[in-house]
Amino acid sequence: MVGWVVLITGGLTGIGRATALAFAREGAMVSVTGRRAEAGAELVRELRALGAEAEFIGADVRNENDVRAMVDNTVARFGRLDVAVNNAGTEGVPGPLTEQTPETYAATFDTNVLGVLLCLKHELRVMEAQGFGSIVNVSSTMGSRGAPNASLYVASKHAVEGLTKSGALEAAIFGVRVNAIAPGPVDTAMLDRFTGSSERKAGLIAGIPLRRAGKPEELADSILFLASDKASFITGQIISVNGGKTAS
């Protein structure tokens, strides 16, 4: 992956941050995006310390002008776009379905679904013209099953998987691959917010056959595989990385 150009949304924390560091260690040139300039600058310093060329681009994936600019600025800076990782996401507002509102819907879907749609739109615009590229979206174990008190998050991740499969079918003729990973519980700040307490977190982890949460670095490794030439005949697939949670 030496010299590859990689764009990562939601790259400042958790899985996105681990993925940026992993690509940097492989010799890629990395654009990371997010909404916090100070954290972005700090991550870029870390990436450059690993020997990578790296840039931070401030962007809100809910805003099409931001998304268009983030893709175009990456291409202007590095010359092309080999890999895009659409990781930006939110847990939204958990709670019973009967308590959800148009506002809580928008709080979840604007980032998790509209954001992925806009990113795919502009990444494919570039990659299809190039005739190559690989996109990895980040879904969730909940993208293929239900969960109480998480209806909007669950629905948004089902939508991500639909976008992934449809995008893959449209892009294949251009030599572009589109896949997704579906993480189970991963030890990140989002998991802490989602569970709300150490007891609930422990209960969720107890349902994982491997009896632990995933590490962001483990998800990053899966993303690197899907992005790489080792996965050259894989497209339109959702790869579960969840410690066996969906094995039964």
Image: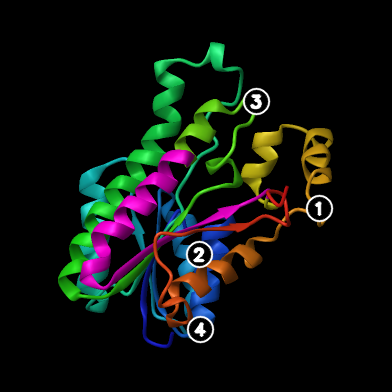
* Circle 3: residue type: Pro
Mark 2 / mark 3, whichever is N-terminal: 2
Residue indicated by mark 1: 209
Q: Is residue 8 visible?
A: no
Q: Are marks 1 and 4 in contact (CB under 8 Å)?
A: no
Instruction: Report the mark closest to the observer, 2 or 3.
Output: 3
Magenta residue span: 158-185
Residue indicated by mark 4: 26
Q: Is residue 100 visible?
A: yes
Instruction: Report the mark closest to the observer, 2 or 4.
Output: 4
Image coordinates for residue 155, horizontal then vertical, percent = 48, 33
Would residue 168 appear left or right of 10 to someone viewing this image?
A: left
Q: Nearer the viewer, residue 102 or 232?
A: 232
Helix, strand or loop for disc 2: helix
Which residue: 27% across, 66% down? 172
Mark 2 vs mark 3, CA separation in Å: 38 Å
Mark 4 vs mark 3, CA separation in Å: 40 Å
Would residue 45 appear left or right of 76 to someone viewing this image?
A: right
Mark 2 / mark 4, whichever is N-terminal: 4
Quarter of the image that includes the N terminus: bottom left
* Circle 1: residue type: Pro
Instruction: Report the mark closest to the observer, 4 or 3.
Output: 3
Numbered mark located on residue 188 in the image: none
Residue indicated by mark 3: 148
Mark 2 vs mark 1, CA separation in Å: 36 Å
